[in-house]
Image (cartoon, grey):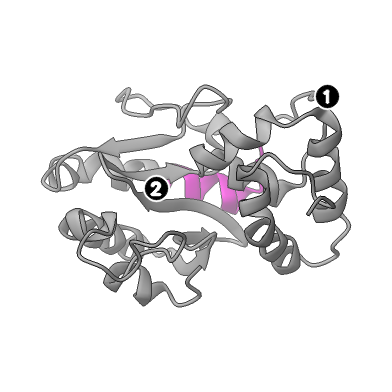
Amino acid sequence: MITDVADYFAKGCGRCDRFATPDCSTRQWAGGLEALRRLCIEAGLTETVKWGHPCYMHAGRNIAIIGAFRGDFRLSFFNAALMKDPEGVLEKQGPNTRHADMIRFRDNAQVKALEPVIRAYLAEAMGYAEAGIKPAREDHALELPEELAEALDHDPELAEAFHALTPGRQKSYVINIGSAKASATRIARIGKFRPKILAGKGAMER
């Protein structure tokens, strides 16, 4: 996966063999992705790379992440349970996503049309970060490390594969990823384990 955010907009995320080719999804949506990037930067967000995608932070918290797919591109919000969504534009990433957290675009021009809404939603999310407000903790049979929960929320393919694993295999990843003290290490382990999860294997399986 990429580590330089500029590479995403020029070549893609680096997670498949379409990376740095004309067939990469980022090429189809280049105009819209750049427009989202501009709005995030103009909002005062700090741009970084997480899970091979441009991630935007504020007050030490992840605020939003950009992604591109074959049929659409997306701006997804972290801590989506807090978002009020007065315009009704937020959708769920997939059946295993707990809350509607993304604005989906199927045309590059949609970003311009929704610019006031995007600015308002970014400002709302930034306000929660500044105030230290977090969603109420939900009870789950398996307590996921924050980085893993966020990766699953913003990677539908990974989420589907992870939730299809046996409870024991899921637990192997929770233990292995959660045992890392540094957040950067936990994120790196998620990237390393992604192929295994997609293959239906546990953390210690070959």
Q: Which residue is mark 1?
A: 141
- Which stretch is magenta? 123-135
Quarter of the rendering occupied by the C terminus: bottom right
Q: In the picture shown, does residue 95 fall above or below 177?
A: above
- Kindly indicate the quadrant of the structure image that contains residue 59: bottom right
The overriding secondary structure of the stretch rendered in magenta is: helix
Circle 1 SS class: loop
Residue closest to the eye, 85 or 18 = 18
Give above or below for 160 relative to 177: above
Q: Left or right: 140 with respect to 153?
A: right
Going by the numbered disc 2, the residue's amino acid type is Leu
Mark 2 is surrounded, within 10 Å at the Cα level, by few (under 14), some (14 to 19) or many (20 or more) other residues, namely many
Residue at 30% across, 68% down: 9
Q: Report helix, strand or loop for mark 2.
A: helix
Q: Which x, y percent locates residue 74? A: 34, 44
In the figure, is residue 180 to the left or right of 17?
right
Q: Residue at x 66, y 28 (%)?
A: 164
Q: Residue at x 40, y 36 (%)?
A: 102
Q: Is residue 84 magenta?
A: no
Residues at marks 2 and 1, CA–CA distance in whole angstroms: 31 Å
Do the residues under discs 2 and 1 have CB atoms within 8 angstroms? no
Residue that carries the numbered disc 2 in the rendered image: 122
- The percent position of residue 104, horizontal first and vertical second, equals 30, 36
Amino acid at pointer 1: Ala
